Image: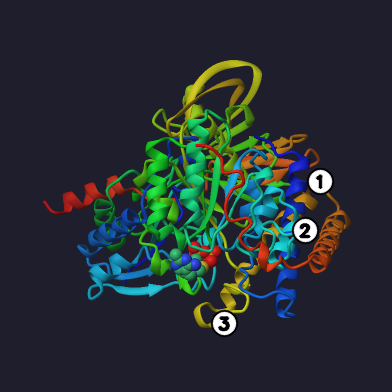
Amino acid sequence: MELTKETQIHMLKRMWTIRNFEIKVMEVHKAGEFVGPAHPYIGEEAVAVGVCSALKDTDYIAGNHRSHGHPLAKGGSIKKAMAEIYGKVDGYCNGNGGSMHLADFSVGILGESGIVASSVPVATGAGLASKLRKKDFVSVVFFGDGASNQGACHESMNLASIWKLPVIFVCENNQFAITTSYQDSVAVDNVSDRAPAYNMPGVLVDGQNVEAMHEATAEAVKRARNGDGPTLIEGLTYRFEDHSLGLGRVTKGEYRSQEEIDKWKERDPIDIHTKKLIERGTLSESECKEIENNSIEEIEEAVNFARNSEFPKPENLFDSMWANPIPKP
Amino acid sequence: MAKIGVIANPSAGKDIRRLVASGRLISNQEKANIISRFISGLLSKGVRDFYFMPDKSGLCKPAIENYRDQININFLDTKFYDGPEQTLIAASLLNDIKCDCILVLGGDGTNRLVAKKINKIPLIPISTGTNNAFPLMIDPTIAGIATGFFVNLLRGKKKYLIRNPYISVKVDENEKDIALIDLAISKQNFVGSKAIWDPEMLEELFLTKSSPLSIGLSSIGSRVLSTNKNKGLRIIFGQQGKLIYAPIAPGLISTLKVKHWSYMNPDEIIKIEKLSGTIALDGEREIEIFGNNKIEISYKKSGPYIIDIIKSIKQDNLSQN
Ligand SMILES: Cc1ncc(C[n+]2csc(CCOP(=O)(O)OP(=O)(O)O)c2C)c(N)n1
Ligand SMILES: [Mg+2]
């Protein structure tokens, strides 16, 4: 497989969108413009972007609590995502969901959930739908190292394997579940080591390398579309920021050292990719800078869109509770 | 007292070849078990000083727990590094303390990294990787006994060492890297997940050895030419070529068209220009190259030593009679 220039540039753009989106979210959260938790994805952008750039719009993804990056990588609307985080009516769930609920079926985003590991069976169900309806879409779920220990995760992988479902399980091993190191909570050394127990291939990939994530996903997609069943991909990555905004008591130094954080920041996924594009002559330094600047502008527009949108009205709270009309089975 | 280094790569044997080929998975429990068995062999020969590369997975832990009171445990200070960088740092630290030999757990790729930093320190490479043309398929207990016998009585005796050749590559006159078994030039324009498995992408291949029993790119060599201990092999692929098939990854038997093949004499410099893509070292894409790069490839005889486990163990057996 070769990587086209378009794909290489697209990946840089999407990573900058996510990075600057998250920087902005942190800034406006600090300024008190919205309330509630939000989990920054900074440092892990190459996982979402590498995976989603190997998918079609008709393929599905599902995320978790740390899921601003996944829908943006899949091509979701930046404005609607920001408005949802602000809790405004123009947001993805009319402002009823917030940071952990950015769903957009039109580009294959099934949604996210704050219940750790709960999206894993959801995406597995989408895989079952693909198989039962004889469609060729694949379904991808992003979950953490912490989530990988949940029953729902094991059950889904087992089911997906015995039914040979077109599901790709993407474990974003950012090495911590809040403050617990995966070394202390995952009984094997790599989450991907568990794959043989589900009788599926498991691959350990450098999660800071967007092209490596893309390539592994492209191969897993081929396998899934071919009817050969699921794959478990572990992207080894690192969360550069705190677990969640507004959790002042969980500070950096208590469970990981500054040296460790600094070491990982040297492996910034955007820097790694930018350096490659310049070396190859795909883009010049100033063209890369332009991509960064454009994304800042784009995010600024999204924030203004969110600020100018209204809060939902209390009387509309139950409007989106049920599908309307309720579809026949 | 003999000092024994241990470098075990916790990520060996986990890459994309589990997905695109049928690469085996050696669990880290098994890697830890291999270290324990190796140490038991050495202990039976009274060797006690060990220098471990620390790793987050704790591959050395079981060995240390089993033999806590019997061995002297030292950890190399590799700071916050992990991955390939950590292996390189650990190898140069072992070189600095002049350790007597190094157990390396990994595949061809891990051994390549260690070989870059250790001068003449002999290796005991035990296979836990995917393509394993360099490491030995041997029980670590026996390797431990043989190594113990070697460091006690045979140290410095050339007869019990095997010197391996290597391939060096320069890009635009800068020493760039080495390969222990195979160097391939691939059309693939990015490093990505590193492994090589698509035969259509291969442009050229350089080998230090090829046995009919090898798996991986080196398997191609013995299918066109009988190997010569003192020479490397060069193979060029192309549309109008001889059709052969070879197991280029575990469970993956590919058809290839070989246009040209020849031996490489030691130190002969082969110049390559106008190719773009990637250079793969021991099965892993590592270096991106462009049409304007000048590549120089040569076969060298003065590569890493490994302990001749079979000769050493035979000598040990004789010494007991
Ligand atoms: C079922 C459940 N248990 C506990 C929590 C509290 N919680 C929120 S995030 C989190 C850690 C998740 O870690 P991981 O899966 O590694 O994802 P990461 O935050 O590292 O991206 C926990 C325990 C929850 N939301 N849901
Ligand atoms: Mg985590």
The residue type indicated by label 3 comes to Thr
- Residue highlighted by disc 2: A79
Establish if B107 lies above or below B254. below
The residue type indicated by label 2 comes to Lys
C-alpha distance separating marks 3 and 1: 40 Å
Say whether residue A137 is left or right of residue A313.
left
Marks 3 and 1: same chain? yes
Instruction: For mark 1, name the chain.
Output: A
Question: Which label belongs to residue A282?
Answer: 1
* Residue farthest toward the left in the current orientation of the protein: B321
Residue B196 placed where, x, y %?
A: 56, 37
Q: Is residue B44 visible?
A: yes
Q: Is residue B232 visible?
A: no
Q: Earlier in the sequence, mark 2 or mark 3?
A: 2
- Residue highlighted by disc 3: A251
The residue type indicated by label 1 comes to Thr
Nearest-to-viewer mark from 3 and 1: 3
C-alpha distance separating marks 1 and 2: 29 Å
Q: Earlier in the sequence, mark 3 or mark 1?
A: 3
Marks 1 and 2: same chain? yes
Badge 2 element: helix
Q: Earlier in the sequence, mark 1 or mark 2?
A: 2
Nearer to the camera, A12 or A163 = A163
Establish if A78 lies above or below B200. below
Q: Residues within 10 Å of mark 2 (few under 14, many from 20)?
A: many
Instruction: For mark 3, name the chain.
Output: A
* Residue farthest toward the front in the current orientation of the protein: A315
Residue B232 placed where, x, y %?
A: 54, 34
Query: Which residue is rendered at x = 46% and y = 32% of the image?
Result: A228
Say whether residue B36 is left or right of residue A68.
left
Residue A149 placed where, x, y %?
A: 40, 60
Instruction: For mark 2, name the chain.
Output: A
